[in-house]
Amino acid sequence: MILVLAAVFAGTAQWAAANSADLLITGRLIPPACTPTLSGGAVIDYGDIPVSNLSASAAHTLEDRDVSLTVTCEEDTALGIRITDARAESKPLLGSEIPQPVKHSQSNLAVATANTQTMGLGNDAAAGKLGVWWMTVDRANLRATNSLSEEVSEPRLLYSDNSGISWGETTTSPLNPHFAGAGVGAFAIKGKGVNTPAVATVHTFPMVVGAALNTKGRLNVKDDTTLDGVGTFTIYYQ
């Protein structure tokens, strides 16, 4: 009896295989399209800086520069921003490879004191590390508005160290974009009355950039040398 049943089942399977067709159900789920834009043409230009301005023993802090990141979405969207240093290999370590920067005489903002806050400014012709830069968020002017032009945010900055699984308010200044390691940290504007990112069509992050150049003795600047810091802002959809 067992052998007979096996033969019947085998025959049925062969018949089904020869007389059937598969219907595939496919498609893609895509998040709402959002576009990031940086003010000032996405360039901060410090112009010509005489080498004579550099110190033999201290980092040379440059003046603060304002920049604003605006993310515009096709529909109300919760999102975070990831910041990556595209010149990480050129970043000198604070204390050991560049003196700890001090506040610029015309600034009232804190300077970076941790290597997770800084990014590189490129190298000179002899691979000397030119300096560091960092960012401070103007929290009081963080703003997110929805498709009805209603403000749906609070002037607070959120940070996630686990790719958006959980969020908490951060008051660290300057920003600490590399605190959680590569590819997992993200910043967001706090939604009104919630501890999660604002759901909005326009997310505005006003920021201030600070920078400091290395000492004369650590650099080899015999020809014109261009500062080459590059920070990449990536949208992380919540």
Image (tube, rainbow, N blue to C red):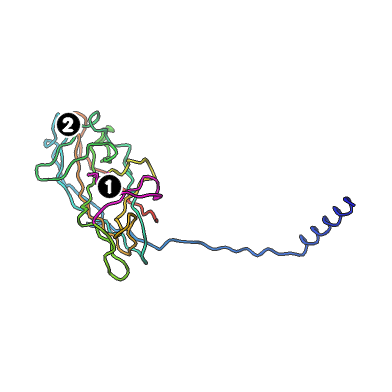
Q: Is residue 215 above or below residue 41?
A: above
Instruction: Please name the residue that numbered disc 2 is placed on.
Output: 216
Q: Which residues are magenta?
A: 155-175
The residue shown at (38%, 49%) is 166
Give the image location of residue 112, x and y in percent: 22, 39
Q: Is residue 164 magenta?
A: yes
Instruction: Please name the residue that numbered disc 1 is placed on.
Output: 170
Which residue extends farthest front?
Answer: 193
In front here: 39 or 32? Answer: 32
- Proximity of marks 1 and 2: CB atoms separated by less than 8 Å: no
Instruction: Answer left or right for 109 relative to 154.
Output: left
Which residue extends farthest bottom?
Answer: 148
Q: Main secondary structure of the magenta part?
A: loop
Give the image location of residue 187, x and y in percent: 32, 50
Dot placed on the residue nearer the N-terminal end, 1 or 2: 1
Mark 1, secondary structure of its residue: loop
| Mark 1 vs mark 2: in front | 1
Quarter holding the C terminus is bottom left
Mark 2 residue crowding within 10 angstroms, few (<14) / some (14–19) / many (20+):
some
Give the image location of residue 73, x and y in percent: 35, 64
Mark 1 residue crowding within 10 angstroms, few (<14) / some (14–19) / many (20+):
some
In front here: 230 or 234? Answer: 234
The residue shown at (27%, 47%) is 170
As shown in the figure, which amino acid type bears the numbered disc 1? Thr
As shown in the figure, which amino acid type bears the numbered disc 2? Lys
Mark 2, secondary structure of its residue: helix
Distance of label 1 from label 2 (alpha carbons): 36 Å
Give the image location of residue 57, x and y in percent: 14, 29
Q: Is residue 86 magenta?
A: no
Query: Looking at the image, how many numbered discs can be counted on the residues?
Result: 2
